[in-house]
Amino acid sequence: MTKSPMASFQPAGKHPARSFDKELAWWQRDPIYQIYPLSFQDTAGDGKGDLAGVLSRIEYLQWLGVGAAWPGPVFSSPMADYGYDITDFTGVDPLFGSLEYLDRLIDELHACELGCFSTLCPIIRRTCILGF
């Protein structure tokens, strides 16, 4: 059986690859890792990734040397467009977990000195009026 690269991982503060140019802002010099939670890591056993799965892999993100995580949309959605068809920008879709999991993910990323981006999917709603 092959040993996982995470087996010997020990966080050592800043990743050496991230310190090459202190003149630039972190978002200009550090890699940003986009995560599509639905296919990233399943912890509920239903075959669908969730926020708890992303939380369980923060050490892996550190090991990669990224400066920030960018989870795909996890807000309430009918999932007709893989989560980009958001119906409630204030709630996490139960498929992914809860708002508490999202808060914990952001807190843990920041505790590890990693940034966190959010996907914003503005929806322009139109009302068609006859004769307009």
Image (cartoon, rainbow, N blue to C red):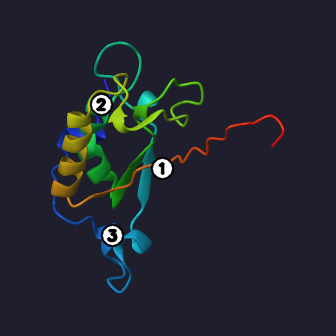
Circle 3 residue: 18
State the quadrant of the C terminus: top right
Residue 42, picture quadrant = top left
In the image, what residue type sits under mark 2?
Gly
Question: What secondary structure is found at the residue carrying circle 3?
Answer: helix
Does residue 29 appear in the picture of this structure? yes
Q: Amino acid at mark 3?
A: Arg
Evaluate whether residue 3 shows in this view: no
Q: Is residue 93 above or below residue 62?
A: above
Farthest front residue in view: 131
| Residue count near mark 3 (Cα–Cα under 10 Å), binned few <14, some 14–19, many ≥20 | some
Q: CA distance from mark 1 to mark 3?
A: 27 Å
Q: Residue furthest top?
A: 46
Q: Upstream in the sequence, badge 1 or badge 2?
A: 2
Mark 1 or mark 3: which comes first in sequence?
3
Element under disc 1 = loop
| Distance Cα–Cα, label 1 vs label 2 | 21 Å
82 sits to left or right of 119: right
Q: CA distance from mark 2 to mark 3?
A: 25 Å
Question: Is residue 14 or residue 76 the one in the foreground?
Answer: 76
Kindly identify which numbered label has been placed on residue 120: 1
Query: Which residue position holds label 2?
Result: 53
Tag on residue 34?
Answer: none
